[in-house]
Amino acid sequence: MAPNMQRVADLAIAGYVPLSTIDWPGTLCTTIFLQGCPWACVYCQNTELMDPRAQGTVAWQDIQAFLKRRQGLLDGVVFSGGEATRQPALGAAITQVRELGFQIGLHSAGAYPARFAEVINDVDWIGLDIKAMPDGYQPIIGADVGAKAWQCLDILLAEVARRKNTDRPLTYEVRTTIYPHSSVARDLPQIVTALRERGVENFALQEARERGTSERFQEQAQNWDLAAWRHTWNDLVAQVENAGFTSAVIRPA
């Protein structure tokens, strides 16, 4: 087996969705979930994908066989997670999928700026999670690593500018997830201002869902004042919609 193929064969794949209309807005795609994430977001709904030691459950050759049967029927393939950029074989996998004629989407929280920069040239759309201000990640994921995510944002925007007015522009969505009584909800106006100052045009505000999260988060949710939160949520939605984004998407729970 060629070295490149061997690398891709080592990709830890937790599963895939054969057809999705939501993982890449406006695109019919297959979504591949890669195992492992270095962060433990309090509102994560894919906690089973966090463990980087867990083995994949789907072989890469099975993914290839499936995609070959879908040539001409799907527009693209999204690599998600977990954190897709955690795996060294991501770039080789993207190359092989592109060779089958599919566009490439990527979901990332920006945990690995070097690999993010390594693969971005071969990606057509990115959904990047910005979870807080650079110094505000500790309450959300338990680690002070926000600078990495914001570095990935700068890499993304530079690539968008580089490919502007070309035959293969890079499209994207920056999204932030909030929930009641959280620091990120409190800081959202500051986050939005910082994103606009950097030149972000496409933003999505997401409300965390309780279902599927950790027991700790679900217990915390029992104490939420939801009536007060609806007023806060509506105020924050209005601020996002009036911030000047070209596209402002609102995703309530």
Image (spheres, rainbow, N blue to C red):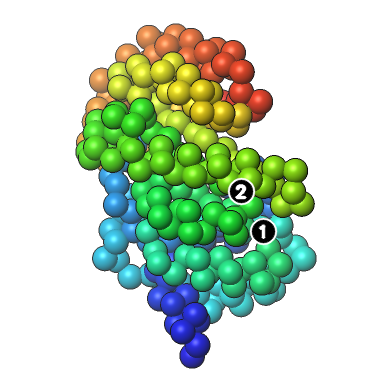
Badge 2 element: strand
> Mark 1 Cα within 10 Å, few/some/many (few <14, many 20+)?
many
Pinpoint residue 185: horizontal percent, then vertical percent.
37, 20
Q: Name the residue at 52% across, 13% down.
A: 239
Q: Which of 42 and 217 is in front in this view?
A: 42
Using the numbered discs, state the Cα–Cα distance from disc 1 to disc 2 in whole angstroms: 8 Å
Q: Residue 103 bears which disc, if any?
A: 1
Q: Is residue 160 visible?
A: yes
Is 120 placed left or right of 40 in the picture? right
Amino acid type indicated by mark 1: Gln
Pinpoint residue 170: horizontal percent, then vertical percent.
64, 47
Which numbered disc, 1 or 2, marks the residue that appears first in the sequence? 1
Q: Residue 183 bears which disc, if any?
A: none
Pinpoint residue 140: horizontal percent, then vertical percent.
29, 33
> Mark 2 Cα within 10 Å, few/some/many (few <14, many 20+)?
many
Q: Nearer the viewer, residue 183 or 112?
A: 112
Pinpoint residue 141: horizontal percent, then vertical percent.
27, 39
| Pointer 1 with pointer 2, Cβ within 8 A | yes
Q: Is residue 14 visible?
A: no
Q: Which of 183 and 158 is in front in this view?
A: 158
Q: Name the residue at 61% across, 42% down.
A: 160
Q: Mark 2 points at which residue?
A: 125
Q: Name the residue at 24% across, 31% down.
A: 139
Badge 1 element: strand
